[in-house]
Image (cartoon, coloured by chain):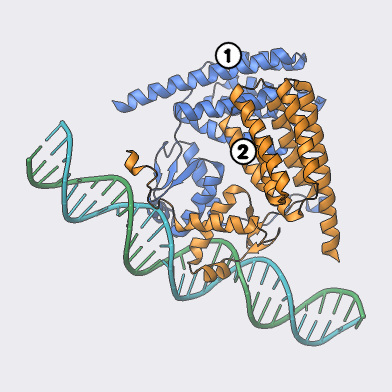
Chain colours: A orange, B blue, C green, D cyan
Amino acid sequence: MSALEGLEVRRTTTAQQLADGLSERIMAGAFGPGDRLRESAIAAELGVARNTIREAVRILELTGLVRYEVNRGAVVIAPTPEKVEALYTARERLETAAVARTPRPGQLDAITRAFHELEDAARTGDPRAIVDRDLAFHQAVVALLDSSRLDEFFAAMTQELRFYLTVLSKSETPEEVVAEHAVILDAIRLGDRDRAVAEIRAHIDTSVRRLNEMLVERHLTNKS
Amino acid sequence: MSALEGLEVRRTTTAQQLADGLSERIMAGAFGPGDRLRESAIAAELGVARNTIREAVRILELTGLVRYEVNRGAVVIAPTPEKVEALYTARERLETAAVARTPRPGQLDAITRAFHELEDAARTGDPRAIVDRDLAFHQAVVALLDSSRLDEFFAAMTQELRFYLTVLSKSETPEEVVAEHAVILDAIRLGDRDRAVAEIRAHIDTSVRRLNEMLVERHLTNKS
DNA sequence: TACAGTTGAACTGTACTACAGTTTTCGGCA
DNA sequence: TGCCGAAAACTGTAGTACAGTTCAACTGTA
């Protein structure tokens, strides 16, 4: 079997590929929040039929990056204070529940590794990479819950959040980011559950506050 | 604004209506787990175009009741021991995290109310109603987490679970169901978090075990 | 100048047709 | 019985068409 290791045929559809591609573009900011995805335009530009684009966008909808409005088609989600709040509340519940559990050794290692990768990213200073590692760290924390379904759910939220962060072009020095996560990791490693919970809370609190500030700011500049 | 309360025009598409209808049929058992939803057949029967059915099924996919397989189209999800396990694990994590929190008065009332409705349903003996109230009780418990996103996530899982239960035609006397939930409610009302967590665990444990037994049974009878 | 009403272009939602490539079925063959 | 290959059934995609909706520019009016 090893001679055929990794060999695989196409096993995907045009619509799926389009969905992936569109997802990337949206994440990269090619479409802003609230923008409509015009089917005919996209179809023409990419040389595919409109119904294929429609399928692709429906697939995209699964990831939560766009939603359909009747007679307006697919619209890129837009962050609002309420949505950000709801997202972070869910995160807080999951992450605090996670750190309240006794970690298995492998899980601790995974979190520690995630932290070190965050440090590495911070050194390079690439904001995009930092955000990625930041979210990966939290994903590793949620993995403490030992639930694949919750892992998936969190991953979906992460995707949404990453988009918001991209849109709002986060501001925070890499050192601060690392420091904030270091205390969380510390508490987890020491087995100090209460402190871990408190640190997670504090971390999420400042995050949501900062995000909302950026939101108002963006709103104001958009008005002008 | 109250003069226009509840007023709303049609605001829905054919595909959405079809999705709702199909969802009902699937839940009612018109399509068994693993069954394919054949587009042309459905389209012809309902007198709509095939791409409209396709859209409807994509919408259905959002609820998790079907998933797409390349070149096989939409397939109704089927319970497997692994899936049931994963589903219940996620439930356990959420519900135990929920009862570990201090409930607001309104929340306690909601749970109590849900319990009484479960009792009422148990008296009628209608299995379908009992399952509905059972799940509603747990939804009320998860609401303790105060997170709309988690409420939605749990609701989606509930939908999936309800389907599994329908398929496997659950066996358990109404009295047992009520008794199991009564102890949970009790623990919550008394503010005894540890016991609440333990009761939730026990409840979910027996549930998953019973479901898996029914799964094996079904598997065996299907083989014959 | 501000504003309500009208109009037309741009789009979405849906239908229908077509066809290549895949899967499934089914009858025969060993 | 179990395997094999051809036919049938079905999915994925393309392309066209059109009614109904949305939106923005235009018009006339106060």
Kind of residue sitting beneath label 1:
Glu
The reply to whether residue B221 is visible in this rendering is yes
The reply to whether residue B48 is visible in this rendering is no
Residue bearing mark 2: A153
Q: Which residue occupies 52% across, 46% down? A: B61
Q: Residues within 10 Å of mark 1 (few under 14, many from 20)?
A: few
Count of number-bearing discs: 2
- Secondary structure under tag 1 reads helix
Q: Position of residue B191 (x, y in %)?
A: 78, 15
Q: Are marks 2 and 1 on the same chain?
A: no
Q: Quadrant of the C terminus of chain A?
A: bottom right
**Residue B86, labelled with which disc?**
none
Q: Quadrant of the N terminus of chain A?
A: top left
* Real-space CA distance between mark 2 and mark 1, rounded to the nearest whole angstrom: 35 Å
Q: Chain of mark 1?
A: B
- Secondary structure under tag 2 reads helix
Residue bearing mark 1: B175
A44 above or below D4? below
B65 above or below A54? above
Q: Which residue occupies 46% across, 22% down? A: B212
Q: Residues within 10 Å of mark 2 (few under 14, many from 20)?
A: some
Q: Position of residue A115 (x, y in %)?
A: 69, 35
Q: Position of residue A184 (x, y in %)?
A: 75, 30
Q: Between residues B157 and A121, which one lies in front from this camera angle? A: A121
